[in-house]
Amino acid sequence: MNRVGFFVSSALVLLALLSSMLFVVDQRQFGVVYALGEIKDVITEPGLNFKLPPPFQNVSYIDKRLLTLDSPDTEPMLTLEKQRMVIDWYVRWRITDPRAYIRNVGLDEAAGANQLNRVVRNAFQEEINRRTVRELLSSKREQLMADVKREVLEQVKGARPWGIDVIDVRITRADYVEAITESVYRRMEAERKRVANELRSTGAAEGEKIRADADRQREVTVANAYRDAQKIKGEGDGQAAAIYAEAFGRDAQFAQFYRSLQAYIASFGKKGDVMIIDPNSSDFFKAFRGGGAGGAAPAPGKK
């Protein structure tokens, strides 16, 4: 029984020892083997590997994938015109040399991100200090990001290489600080109102001009029409007078009688009209007294 227990415990010890000597490197990682705190080997290919059991050798892992570093703070930066701008950015980077990375940066990805953040922020500050807000927002934005990337690469690949590679540097947002943004919005609102009022004034002036021109054209048209109407009316009156003269010239007594009838119609046009005249002495009722078309008629006797 003691022999069986001895064999079982020995087998368990061997399995534990063997498991401590085996390790698996994932395809997304570097495997770094340490011997008494010193880097012994770096495993770059995925698979099963062997090492001495602790404490003689230990293994740690470092990510070999493409990493992203986002700007962690919103502290404003000054442009060439001394305008305070808030810049949000990100960096795509990866570890390429684990030995140099561990010696010069740190044991994990967080250490590299912290130091890289400082270098990238300083590079952005230096480049933004050389540019205006307009250049930052439009014309020279791509050049700014390229210059920042170049400066960061010079830092990480200098006399003491970090063992990393910077793939890309990008600006995601560039904006004024909150206090300046509010004043900018107010200026923009005032400018839009000024433009709107100017457009309204211009429109009102154009409207008045159009209305004045339309009124002038209407007056001219009405005057021309009245002139033409009066001309036609005058020609008609002239023709009528000529016709009357010709007709009345043929029979003077009938013309006088006709005119008297027209005068009677005009004088007694309404039912309640009253005229006080001596019919015997007035020529107005001569047609009545004549007893015919202009003939003399005896005056009515008095009763």
Image: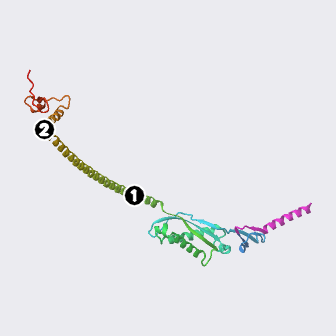
Q: Amino acid at mark 2?
A: Ala
State the CA–CA distance, disc 1 to disc 2.
88 Å
**Mark 1 crowd level (few <14, some 14–19, many ≥20, 10 Å Cα):** few
Instruction: Say few, some or many: other residues with alpha carbon within 10 Å of mark 2 (under 14 / 14 to 19 / 20 or more).
Output: few
User: Which residue lies under the disc numbered 1?
Assistant: 190
Q: Is label 1 or label 2 in front?
A: 2
Q: In which quadrant is the N terminus drawn?
A: bottom right
Residue at the limit of the structure toward the left, as seen here = 281
Q: Earlier in the sequence, mark 1 or mark 2?
A: 1
**Could you tell me how many numbered marks the image carries?**
2
In screen coordinates, is 266 left or right of 212?
left
**Direction from residue 31 to residue 274 in the image, left or right:** left
Residue at left offset 61%, top offset 66% = 68
Q: How is the image coloured?
A: rainbow
Percent position (x, y) of residue 164? 63, 72
**Does residue 276 appear in this view?**
no
Instruction: Identify the image quadrant of residue 207.
Output: bottom left
**Along the line of sight, the residue nearer the viewer: 185 or 113:** 185
Q: Is residue 122 magenta?
A: no
Which amino acid type is marked by label 1? Answer: Ala
Name the chief secondary structure element in magenta.
Answer: helix
Please, which residue is most extreme toward the bottom here? Answer: 159
Drawn side of residue 185 relative to residue 253, left or right: right
Residue 20 magenta: yes
Front one among 210 and 107: 210
Q: Where are the magenta residues, as a range?
A: 1-29
Q: Position of residue 139 (x, y in %)?
A: 48, 69
User: Residue at horizontal 40%, vertical 58%?
Assistant: 192
Disc 2 target residue: 252
The x, y position of residue 52, in whole percent, is 78, 71
Looking at the image, residue 248 lies above or below residue 42? above
Disc 1 + disc 2, Cβ < 8 Å: no
